[in-house]
Image (spheres, rainbow, N blue to C red):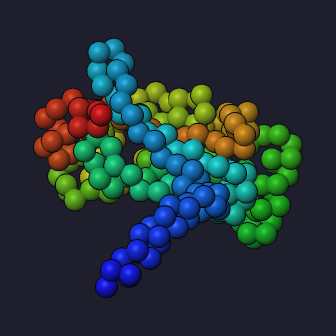
Amino acid sequence: SLPEVEPEAGKSKTDEAVPLPPGLLSPTPSDSITTHTKVIGGSSVVRVEWRIDNCKAKFKDCVGRPLVSPQFEAAGMPELRLMVFPSLDVHAGGLSTRAQKARYEAMTAEGRFCGALKFKVVTNFSDKLVVRFSLFVGDAVTDVLEHDFADHIIHGADFSGNWLESLRGGSLVVGVEIVSAQGAPPASAETPLGVAQGT
C-alpha cells in the first residue's frame, strides 16, 4: 500500500494548483456581502454592505421583480436579505416584460435611474421584533426607520436620486445599518448591537 500513498501526496500538490484558474474565483466577489461594526455617538451599529457587480445587466434581467441579495446574518438575526426594486416609471406597470426592458435601457441611456431598497427579516419570533435601521444606496442614506418585522417581514424606502451616479466600476453598493433590535434572540437583545459581531 506504500506506493499508493505517494500518488496521493502528489495529488494534494495538484489540488493546490486547482484554484489558480481565475474562472473558479469569479462567483466569490460577485454579489458580495460584507458586515462590520462601527460606533456612532457611542453606540454600536452593524453595517452590512451588498456590492452588486455588473448591476446594469442584473437590473435589466430582473425588470418587473426585485433583485435579492444572498442571505446573511447580522445583529443576532440569522435570516436577512436586501431587496432592490428598480423603478421604471408610473406608467410601466402594464407593459410587457420586453417593453419594460426597453424602457429600462432607454432610462439608463438617458443617464438617470433610481428605485427602492427594502430590508427583509425572516423571524420565528411572532410576538415582536422591532428593528431600528437605515438604508443606503451609494452615498444616499435614509433617516433611521423603525419597523416591527413580526407584523411584516419586509420594509424599505424609495431612493429618488440618480443611482447611475453612485456606480463604481459598474458596481453599486447598497446596504443597511442596524441601530437596534428589540425582541430578537436574547444574545442580541440583551447586549449592544455589534458585540456578537465584533471580531
* Residue at the spot 43% in from the left edge and 53% down from the top edge: 81
Comparing 131 with 151, the one in front is 131
Residue 156 percent coordinates (x, y): 47, 44
Residue 62 higher or lower than 176, as above or below = below
Please give left or right for residue 178 compared with residue 21 in the image: left
* Residue at the spot 29% in from the left edge and 21% down from the top edge: 43
Residue 86 higher or lower than 37, as above or below = below
For the question of whether residue 93 can be seen, the reply is no
Residue 194 percent coordinates (x, y): 28, 32
* Residue at the spot 86% in from the left edge and 47% down from the top edge: 109
Image quadrant where one finds the C terminus: top left
For the question of whether residue 70 can be seen, the reply is yes
Residue 44 higher or lower than 50, as above or below = above
Residue 82 percent coordinates (x, y): 47, 50
Residue extending furthest toward the top:
41
Please give left or right for residue 90 compared with residue 67 in the image: right
**Where, by quadrant of the figure, is residue 167 drawn?**
top right
Q: How many marks?
A: 0
Please give left or right for residue 21 compared with residue 175 in the image: right
Residue extending furthest toward the bottom:
1
Residue 22 percent coordinates (x, y): 64, 57
**Where, by quadrant of the figure, is residue 134 drawn?**
top left
Comparing 75 with 145, the one in front is 75
Please give left or right for residue 186 compared with residue 167 in the image: left
* Residue at the spot 36% in from the left edge and 30% down from the top edge: 37
**Where, by quadrant of the figure, is residue 183 drawn?**
top left
Image quadrant where one finds the N terminus: bottom left
Residue 57 higher or lower than 197, as above or below = below
